[in-house]
Amino acid sequence: MLTNTKKSITFKMPSQSINLLAKICLLTLTTLPLANVAVAEEVTIRTTPIAINKILINPDIGITDYHSFDIKNDPWWNEPTHPETSVVYFRWYWEELEPQQGQYNFKLIDDTINQAAALGKKTVIRFMTMAGKNDEHYNPSPNAGKKILGIPCWLKTQIDDNTVSDVCANDNSYIIDYKNPLFKKYLQRFLMAMGNRYNNNANLLRLDVGLVGSWGEWNLATHKEFHSTLGYHGYTDKDLRVYPEMLAKAFPNKTLTMVIGSVDENILGYTTKRNYGWRADCLGDWEPNWNHMENSYPDTIKHTLGLGNILNTYPDKNFLSRWKKAPVDFEICYTMEDWAKRPDIYTEEKVKQTFDEALNMHTSLLNLKSGFIPPQYQPLLNDFLKKVGYRFELSMVEITSDLIAGSPILINSRWKNTGVAPSYNNYPVVWRLRDQDNNVVAYFETNNDIRNWLPANNQNETIPSYKLQNTFTLPNNINAGNYFLDVALVTPNTHNAVIKLGIEGMKQDKWYQIKSIYLNCK
């Protein structure tokens, strides 16, 4: 695959003046015997970076901290076995964010996003409207010890016939009617207020569509002992599709992920055909008789493809390839520490199968619920971390130039993604020239888009190779001497390197030293 990019350079001038530089070059030439003066010739230099096999903590992928920011290194939590993270995941009930009508608790979200950003991490959030029956708020919530209403009390008094005053009882058995027009009106207003504030916040990575059902999981679990799915209780596609549409209207610039749902509703295919990603809770559930891994996931995916026994009015025949443009996220059932207490079910082989299933679905993020990692599962998790999301390797660099100041330089490079998913955000390739005193004398910027660097479709396929051809011009005013050619994947419109590559040579600033070259004057 070929990407041909050409762009002007930005360079920093060395401290010497142009006149002094001219004199130095002239002196070099005139003091040499004429017979020894060589005519510059175009040369080609080729190098092959060495791949490494280590865990790389990179933006937007991997394990998420869950309602924590750095649980691995936090002495209050003391979970050093938990992996390092680049993403934090938080969920909030509507009642926490709009306790009084039209008055929003932006501070809760601001503080969360800003604290994560200070650690170099992005945030994923979910807004919820229902909890499980009898669920309570925990510290440090101001409502600690009280039942979680989900919706604000001021709204409950308007839509719940059993709430006859402006005081809501400490009871959360109320089941929301998601067809209620007043509920939908106020929810859209709430979401628009959130979107107006956070839609363009670069530190908010994405949102999952958790507006419906218990814990935002699109079912009525704990409220309905049997048949908790929404379709079974009479909700139609028309009733339900408005909720992902609401969130998309409020956050048009953000990636959204849809909860996987069930065979009794069809909204998953409706959203993935419209560029939503998808997520699934309860990864690793292998309970006897019925479980998510062997029953729920396969049946729901089959239904989404339009191949199930129940009619799907919004089938997505390309569902299994949507990962190429939109993310796939998972959350485990229970915690890995809970798994270790059930060794009859959660054997090392079964846990490996769990991680392999997530990789086969091209996942980018996995929520482990910020728990302790039992030692018997640590090697399996480490192996997973080397593959989850994207993993970029630079496999070849070829430089063609006469290596004279002011002359063209052609840089051919080959890249591959040895992970399981693309990067859904672009981090452009930038080259730079650095002198022996570690001063950057030139940046060579490209306009490539790494979002197109896909991994193999499955582990049996050959990993695609992506070739970049970049032609630049070496600075006119530069001393002769040895220089280093470096490369990095950077935050757009900056020279700030942010992606760790799967190769040797990383410097402290996350730039990679590729080759030492000698430049002549004109």
Image: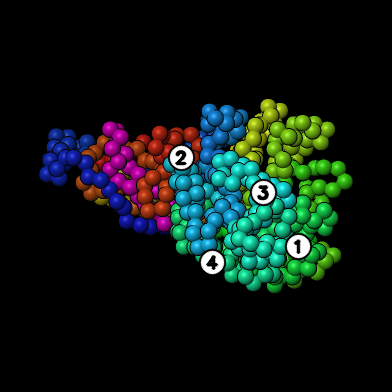
Q: Name the quarter where the N terminus is drawn.
A: bottom right
- What distance separates the C-alpha of mark 4 from that of mark 1? 24 Å
Crowding at dot 3, Cα within 10 Å, few <14 / some 14-19 / many 20+, comes out as: many
4 and 2 marks in contact (CB < 8 Å): no
Q: Which residue is mark 2?
A: 119
Q: Nearer the viewer, residue 16 or 480?
A: 16
Rendered view: 270 above or below 142: below
Q: Which residue is mark 1?
A: 230
Q: Residue furthest front?
A: 165
Q: Which residue is mark 3?
A: 147
Q: Is residue 77 visible?
A: yes
Residue type beneath disc 4: Arg
Rendered view: 377 above or below 326: above
Q: Is residue 269 visible?
A: no
> Which of the marked residues, 4 or 1, is nearer the chain's N terminus?
4
Q: Residue at x 45, y 55 (%)?
A: 201
**Magenta-colored span:** 427-450
Q: Quadrant of residue 160?
A: bottom right
- What distance separates the C-alpha of mark 3 from that of mark 4? 25 Å
Name the element at disc 1. loop
Q: Which residue is mark 4?
A: 189
Residue 444 magenta-highlighted: yes
Frontmost of labels 3 and 1 is 3
